[in-house]
Image (cartoon, helix red, strand yellow):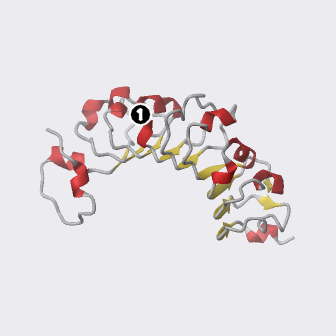
């Protein structure tokens, strides 16, 4: 018998319960055992999971992913997203090392707010993100920024793709930025690059390599 885990949100006291109930109350699950396929019977009762992390080298039973009805955040191989209820996802992390992302990976992600795309990803296009109207927080390389609805971006992390540089043209359309963070190896080519964003409240970058 299942329970409504939502009834326990905000409760910080101790709960004495059996293993099945304990599993249902778990919020985050990080899969670390790569010795066997992750099947639904291995994680029986984990119905309340909101945050799931699956390394690239672990095989997962689609039935297990389909059983996670409260899932809001996931880090996994993008090929697995088709088995997940994407309508409730608020955060997706595509791990570094992934080179190909299915064209339909983000279809149905109507509530997606945060997305991390690795520098290794190739062949992306703007149409892939058209079904993500709430997307406002993105981590990606500078040349990927233009793939998103730039005027909706509020938080942006620029990861280094090997070019080690950020130009005005890379982010000039992100007029509603409130926070931007750059990898330490990235050099800002124009010292005035951040002056064009009236809503910008926080800037994180390596000032030591940008003194010139």
Residue 77 percent location from the top left of the image: 51, 35
Residue 172 percent location from the top left of the image: 78, 55
Q: Nearer the viewer, residue 33 or 14?
A: 14
- For image coordinates 54% across by 35% down, the residue present is 106
- For image coordinates 85% across by 63% down, the residue present is 190
Total marks placed? 1
Residue 38 percent location from the top left of the image: 35, 32
Please give left or right for residue 77 compared with residue 12 in the image.
Answer: right
Q: Is residue 75 above or below residue 67?
A: below
Please give left or right for residue 76 compared with residue 23 in the image.
Answer: right
Kindly indicate the quadrant of the structure image that contains residue 31. top left
- For the C terminus, the image quarter is bottom right
Q: Is residue 156 above or below residue 147?
A: below
- For image coordinates 40% across by 35% down, the residue present is 85
To which residue does mark 1 refer? 84
Q: Is residue 176 above or below residue 115?
A: below
Disc 1 secondary structure class? loop
Q: Is residue 20 visible?
A: yes
Disc 1: CA contacts within 10 A as few (<14), some (14-19) or many (>=20):
some
Please give left or right for residue 135 compared with residue 25 in the image.
Answer: right
- For the N terminus, the image quarter is top left
Kindly indicate the quadrant of the structure image that contains residue 52. top left
Q: Is residue 38 visible?
A: no
Residue 45 percent location from the top left of the image: 22, 39
């Amino acid at each position: 018998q299942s329970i409504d885990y939502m009834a326990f949100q905000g409760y910080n006291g101790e709960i004495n319960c059996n293993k099945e109930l304990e599993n249902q109350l778990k919020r985050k699950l990080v899969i670390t055992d790569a010795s066997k396929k992750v099947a639904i019977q291995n994680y029986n009762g984990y119905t309340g999971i909101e945050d799931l992390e699956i390394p690239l080298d672990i095989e997962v039973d689609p039935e297990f992913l389909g059983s996670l009805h409260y899932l809001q955040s996931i880090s996994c191989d993008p090929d697995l997203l088709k088995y997940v209820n994407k309508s409730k996802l608020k955060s997706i992390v595509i791990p570094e090392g992934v080179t190909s992302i299915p064209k339909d990976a983000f279809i149905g992600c109507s509530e997606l707010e945060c997305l991390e795309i690795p520098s290794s990803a190739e062949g992306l296009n703007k149409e892939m993100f058209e079904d993500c109207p709430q997307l406002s927080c993105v981590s990606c390389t500078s040349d990927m920024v233009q793939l998103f609805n730039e005027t909706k971006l509020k938080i942006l992390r620029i990861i280094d793709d090997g070019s080690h540089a950020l130009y005005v043209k890379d982010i000039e359309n992100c007029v509603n930025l409130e926070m931007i963070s750059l990898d330490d190896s990235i050099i800002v080519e124009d010292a005035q690059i951040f002056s064009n964003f009236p809503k910008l409240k926080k800037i994180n970058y390596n000032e030591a390599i940008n003194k010139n």
